[in-house]
Image: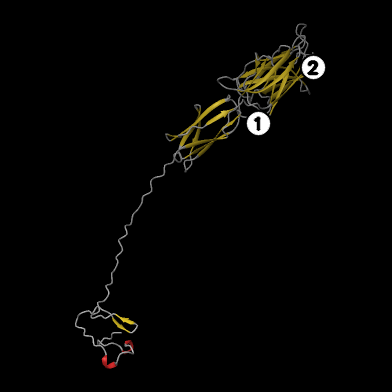
Amino acid sequence: MVTGGGRVSKGFLSNDLSRRDALKIGLKGSVYAAPIVLGATVVQSVGAVTPAQTTATTAAPTLSTTTTAAPVTRTPSVTVTPSSGPAGTPFTITLANFPASTAGAVYINATGLPVTTDANGNATVVFKDLSTPPGSYQVDANVGNVSNQNSPTIQITAPALVGAVTVTSAGGCNPTVFTGSEFPTGVDLGVYITSPSGTNISSFSTFQAHPDGTFQLFTTSGLPTGSLNLVVSAASNVSPHANVLNTTPFMQAACVGDQPYIDGNQVIAGTPLTFTGGHFSPGSTLTVSARSTNGTLLGSTSVTVTATNTQNPGTFSGTLSTTGFPVGTIELVVTATGSNTVLAATNQNIV
């Protein structure tokens, strides 16, 4: 080991050498490059010690990059659930990604349903129409002048066949009574009497079923004897007889003799309604009722049949208050007092 005074430390001398022969190394600024072999130990002789250079590595500066995300594109879309079903099926139409909190409309083959989106641009509307004939119908939406890019379809697979009708008749010349149940509410209904081949024979004024889905109708004129059908349809301004909901066959008995009748006069709502009747059993007590076109009782009064002459032996007359009557068509119905058997019926206009 080389000390600071230029001497070789004793500890590094071989035993083969005398201390007197200690090697002197002159260090005068030069470096002796050859090694000195002392026994088994190799010592590198150096003059001036040059300190190792310390290399400082300076890291390359890191660039701070701010990335601006591209705006998310929201595509307005419309979906329909279910996609098919018979007329009257509630189809749920869902709008997504339209302008937020904006009014618009959903169009089904030009039929518009109003809709307003929520704060997220979404909305839901239900399409349910018993009068839609079978076919495929395109669904589109427009909200704030933004339209969907896809166009789903609603497939109407069949007409709506709903409700049930019970037909009762006292026979002979008595009116036939039609009692309906399980029909849709809030829907205009058209009712027709047809031949088995579909020829229209008679019709009733358009009406709506009771809130419980029921109605009651009476024939108001003589019908041909034999097989007939009562056809109930969802009324439409285009073709009221096309959207059939129910068809019920029935038999009409022959009318032998004079058919009982009741007649009334057109009146303004709130003024008395005068009526007359004939061809009933003299001396019998009858009830004359005013009913709406779906069978709702509006008012009634009692009359007694009199024998006025041989040509018309059983007649009656009377009046009914029309206070509270709806404007439009009503029915005047004659029954035997204490009985539900309809003996005569006619339509009456309230204006």
Q: Secondary structure at mark 1?
A: loop
Q: Position of residue 40 (x, y in %)?
A: 35, 83
Q: Is residue 233 above or below residue 62?
A: above
On screen, residue 286 above or below 308? below
- Percent x, y of residue 222: 71, 12
Identified by mark 2, the residue type is Ser
Give coordinates of residue 224: x percent, y percent.
Answer: 71, 11
Residue with the most extreme right position? 283
Residue 185 as seen in the image, left or right of residue 6: right
Q: As rendered, which of 336 and 109 lies closer to the eye?
A: 109
Residue placed most toward the observer, 290 or 224: 224
What's the distance in space between the residues labelled 2 and 1, CA to CA?
35 Å
Residue on which the image places disc 2: 284
Residue at image point 38% right, 48% down: 69
In which quadrant is the N terminus drawn?
Answer: bottom left
Q: Which mark is residue 211?
A: 1
Q: Which residue ends up furthest to the bottom in the rendered image?
A: 20
Q: Nearer the viewer, residue 228 or 289?
A: 228
**Residue 161 appears in which quarter of the rendering?**
top right
- Closer to viewer: mark 2 or mark 1: 1
